[in-house]
């Protein structure tokens, strides 16, 4: 049980982020465990010095600044969320966009001083790259390429809703997505990605109350009509080819395997994570967990 409790603490230690008791329950995936029992085991870990407690939060590492940073980041995200929801609904008005979810830090109610607002976007089949290109052009022309409030870095179409890489990082990102537009698509996404519940069986479902259903305004209808059929197919293919060619030149230092993981590019999938954050997080998590378990083992000897 100590090892199970340490897993979420080791994961969020990567972000220097302490957890509440109920959050440890969510992320540990402990079956049929009462909060009182969890708190008892946590207190034992605190007494052993493996876990630190500050107020009602727990963490690996003995740094009180983690709590201060978390509270500030939570407040920052709380202030940003209404604007992020508004931007997400605006993105939903673009041609071929079916659903929009907030992803990244803000989806976990966290926002650093320099954090972006990340969006996960679901599109119509065969029009992902055209939809992506229109959104990127809007960002570059009208937002002067600002990433602050308009970071569209992950796209899938309705035929490719299942997340291919299945690990602790992608499961965390999947269950914490926040729907802001197109709630039907969000429910389909959750149904197809039930594998993530294997990592987090007790993580609470996200509410769709503030996520309007799919709709099309007149401009969206007209543009989708214009880009229908073979003409639209050619445009989508060309947009994909141009984007991938640009990425290959820009990130030529990456080997083929790293490029495919960080910049996954398929007809129905587009992921733009050039910093390869996933791998860094998983490696640091394993290191944090190993260190904590070794410390625990020595104390029990």
Image: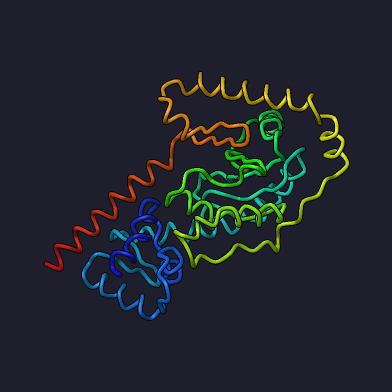
Is any atom of residue 56 visible in this view?
yes
The outermost residue toward the left is 301
**Depicted 245 relative to depicted 33: above or below:** above
175 to the left or right of 52: right
The image position of residue 282, as x and y in percent, is 37, 46
Could you say which quadrant of the image residue 38 lies in? bottom left
Could you say which quadrant of the image residue 79 lies in? bottom right
Quarter occupied by the C terminus: bottom left
253 to the left or right of 74: left
Disc tally is 0
103 to the left or right of 198: right
Quarter occupied by the N terminus: bottom left
Q: Nearer the viewer, residue 183 or 295?
A: 183
The image position of residue 253, as x and y in percent, is 41, 22
The image position of residue 55, as x and y in percent, is 38, 72
Could you say which quadrant of the image residue 53 lies in? bottom left
Q: Nearer the viewer, residue 274 or 235?
A: 235
The image position of residue 34, as x and y in percent, is 41, 79
Look at 67% across and 44% down and name the residue there.
158
Look at 34% across and 62% down and name the residue there.
59
Is any atom of residue 143 visible in this view?
no
Look at 66% across and 31% down and name the residue there.
129
**Depicted 74 relative to depicted 214: above or below:** below
- Display colour scheme: rainbow
């Amino acid at each position: 049980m100590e090892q199970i409790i340490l897993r979420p603490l080791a994961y969020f230690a990567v972000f220097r982020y302490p957890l509440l008791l109920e959050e440890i329950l969510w992320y540990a995936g402990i079956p049929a465990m009462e909060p009182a029992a969890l708190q008892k085991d946590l207190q034992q870990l605190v007494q052993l010095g493996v876990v630190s407690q500050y107020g009602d939060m727990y963490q690996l590492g003995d740094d009180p600044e983690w709590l201060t940073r978390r509270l500030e980041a939570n407040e920052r995200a709380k202030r940003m969320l209404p604007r992020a929801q508004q931007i997400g609904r605006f993105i939903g008005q673009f041609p071929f966009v079916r659903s929009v979810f907030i992803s990244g830090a803000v989806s976990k109610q966290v926002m650093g001083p320099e954090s972006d607002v990340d969006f996960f976007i679901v599109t119509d089949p065969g029009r992902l790259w055209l939809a992506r290109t229109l959104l990127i052009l809007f960002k570059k022309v009208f937002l002067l390429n600002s990433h602050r409030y308009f970071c569209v870095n992950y796209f899938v179409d309705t035929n490719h809703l299942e997340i291919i890489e299945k690990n602790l990082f992608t499961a965390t990102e999947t269950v914490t997505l926040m729907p802001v537009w197109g709630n039907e698509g969000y429910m389909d996404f959750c149904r197809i990605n039930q594998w993530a519940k294997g990592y987090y069986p007790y993580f609470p479902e996200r509410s769709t109350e503030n996520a309007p259903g799919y709709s099309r305004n007149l401009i969206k209808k007209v543009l989708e009509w214009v880009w229908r059929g073979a003409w639209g197919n050619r445009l989508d293919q060309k947009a994909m080819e141009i984007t991938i060619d640009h990425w290959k030149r820009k990130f030529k230092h990456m080997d083929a395997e790293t490029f495919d993981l960080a910049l996954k590019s398929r007809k129905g999938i587009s992921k733009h994570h050039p910093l390869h954050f996933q791998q860094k997080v998983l490696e640091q998590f394993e290191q944090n967990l190993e260190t904590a378990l070794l410390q625990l083992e020595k104390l029990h000897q």
